[in-house]
Structure formats: structure tokens, C-alpha cells
Image: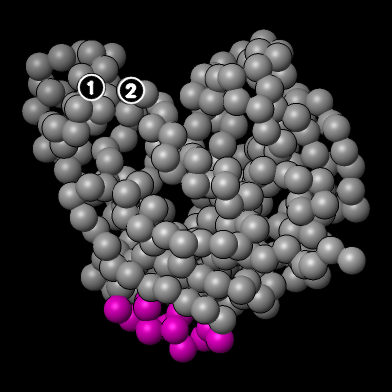
Amino acid sequence: MKASPTLCVFANFRIDNEERLQRMRDSFYSFCDVMPNEWRINIRGCKKLEAAEFIRSNIRAKVFISHKESRRGWFKDSLDTIDGLTSEFVFFWIEDHICISDISVLRGVIEEMSLHCVDQLIYSWFPQHWRTHQVFPVVEVGNYIDVRHVNPRSVSEARKVIGYDFYVISAVSLMRTQFFVGLLKSGRPRLRRWSRFLPFDFEKRASDIAGTVFKIAMPQKELFVAIDDDHHETGYCLISRGLYPGRMQRSGLKDVESLGPSKSIGFLKVLFPRSVRILLRRVAYTLRIC
């Protein structure tokens, strides 16, 4: 009989105010009973010590907490955080998403990911990701997940159907550990879209993963839901559903993670049109100028 798959919770997030801290607590309580065997958490921001104390006091499993925010950037700090990781799967914890499913369902999802050798399962923004990923061919169906195949041909066909360079890799994912580490080390997109101090280049468009072959899966029912981001789907998030208190506007929270060295090239706005500014900004990020 095959042993149950092992799971590590990974996070590298910024907790800068009481609202983010409360959302992190609520998110934690929603899924922690799945009983990961280890936690690898890097916490930044002025509330990092309070967040770390909360996590330590509520976890009995192996936990590694750090507060790295080095000049090398988010990806290098994340690789340091997971150094020596041996778990089969990584749960990329995004602190403003909450599990609304029964924990037994989440466990069943992880079991089937192991059974079908799935590389990535997107656990949140269910309606949006389901519409995008249903263009890939189904290769296996379980009780909890549908498994699909990503390869050069299926990506090409999907881009024709969808009509634009859509995202295939999402941060709100459960991933096979080797696949997750490979994404952290991939260096794609070659021309960076974001500063190295931000996590957003972890997510990959179809063009970024050209030539890659892997298995993706979608849960058959919603697992997690974003607290305050409708993600272009009116009425989707928990606040819109009336299931979570709207204590703080999303605009006030969104700016927290986006603050950083990228603002140092704001002078470009007065000199160049938007398309040129975007190109110059991406060149600057790629050359690590900012």
C-alpha cells in the first residue's frame, strides 16, 4: 500500500498591517487541519514577528520561519526558505485565500494528485481557471480532480481557442516539489515583467513555458476562494458573497506588496508613451537595475 503523500506549506509573503495579519490567521485556520508535515514560511513586513509567533504557536509539525528580504530578491530568498525540502508536494500559501471545502476533500485531492503524478493543481479562482484550463485535453479523471496534459501541441491549440497569451502557471497552486523548485529556478520570462523583489513573475504565461511537458489538474469543486478579489468575475470573492467582512478596501491592501524598488523608475512616465515605458521597465528588471 502506497504511503500518504507528504505536504509542505510554503509562503513568502508580506504582512504589513492588522488586516493582512487577520486574513492570514483566517486563511491558516481554514486549511491547517489537512496536517502538512512541514511548513517553510518567510515573512516580511512590519507585522512579521506577530505573524511568526501566531504560526509557531499553532503548528505542531516541523516549522521553519525566516524573515529574509535580501538584495538578491524574492526568488533567491524563496529558494533559501525551501533548502533541503523532501516533501512530495508544496502548497503555495497565499494568505488572502480561504478554504471553503471540507478538509477530507482537500486530502482526497492531494491523494489523487500523487496517484496520477500531477505536477500542478490550481486551488483557487475556480471559475476563471476552469474556463481557461478546460481547453487542454483530459487524460485522467478521479473522484476529486480532472487531469489534463500540457505539451507544445496542447498549448498551441489552447492559445488558438483562447485568443491570447494566457497564464498556465498560477501561484495559488499545489505542486509537485520538483516542479515547484524548477519554476523558482527557471528564469522565465526571460524579459522580466516585475522587479526581482516581487513574487509575480512566478506565474507563467503559455509563451513562458513553451516546450514544457507536464500534468495539470483542476478540482471538480471549489476548494479556496479569494477574500476580496473578484478576478474579473462579478460576485466571486468572499466579500462579494457576503461571507467575509469588508474591513479594508482592496486598494489599500494591493499597494502593500507592490511597493518597492520599481517605483524608482517612475520618471519614465513623463518621457515615454506607455508601451515604451513597459519595455524599458522590463529591461531594467531583467538587468537588475531596480
Q: In this rendering, would 238 be left or right of 138? A: left
Q: Secondary structure at mark 1?
A: helix
For marks 1 and 2, the one nearer the N-term is 2
Name which residue lies at 70% across and 38% down: 216
Task: Give the vertical position of 247 relative to 145 (above or below).
Answer: below
Name which residue lies at 67% across and 43% down: 119
Task: Name the image quarter holding residue 120.
Answer: top right
Name which residue lies at 10% across and 16% down: 271
Which SS does the magenta portion mostly show? helix
Using the rendered image of the protein, determine whether residue 221 is visible from the camera's viewpoint.
no
Name which residue lies at 23% across and 47% down: 72
Q: In this rendering, would 105 be left or right of 69? A: right
Mark 1 surroundings: few (<14), some (14-19) or many (≥20) residues within 10 A? some
Would residue 61 be counted in the magenta stretch? no
Residue 40 x, y percent position in the rendering: 46, 67
Q: Secondary structure at mark 2?
A: loop
Q: Which residues are magenta?
A: 49-60
- Quarter of the image that includes the N terminus: bottom right
Task: Provide the residue designation for mark 2.
Answer: 191
Residue 243 x, y percent position in the rendering: 63, 66
Q: The disc labelled 2 sits on which kind of residue?
A: Leu
Task: Give the vertical position of 229 relative to 51 (above or below).
Answer: above
Residue 62 x, y percent position in the rendering: 52, 79
Q: The disc labelled 1 sits on which kind of residue?
A: Val
- Quarter of the image that includes the C terminus: top left
Mark 2 surroundings: few (<14), some (14-19) or many (≥20) residues within 10 A? some
Using the rendered image of the protein, determine whether residue 69 is visible from the camera's viewpoint.
yes
Q: Which mark is residue 283?
A: 1
Task: Give the vertical position of 37 relative to 150 (above or below).
Answer: below
What is the distance, in whole Å, between disc 1 and disc 2 at their CAs? 7 Å
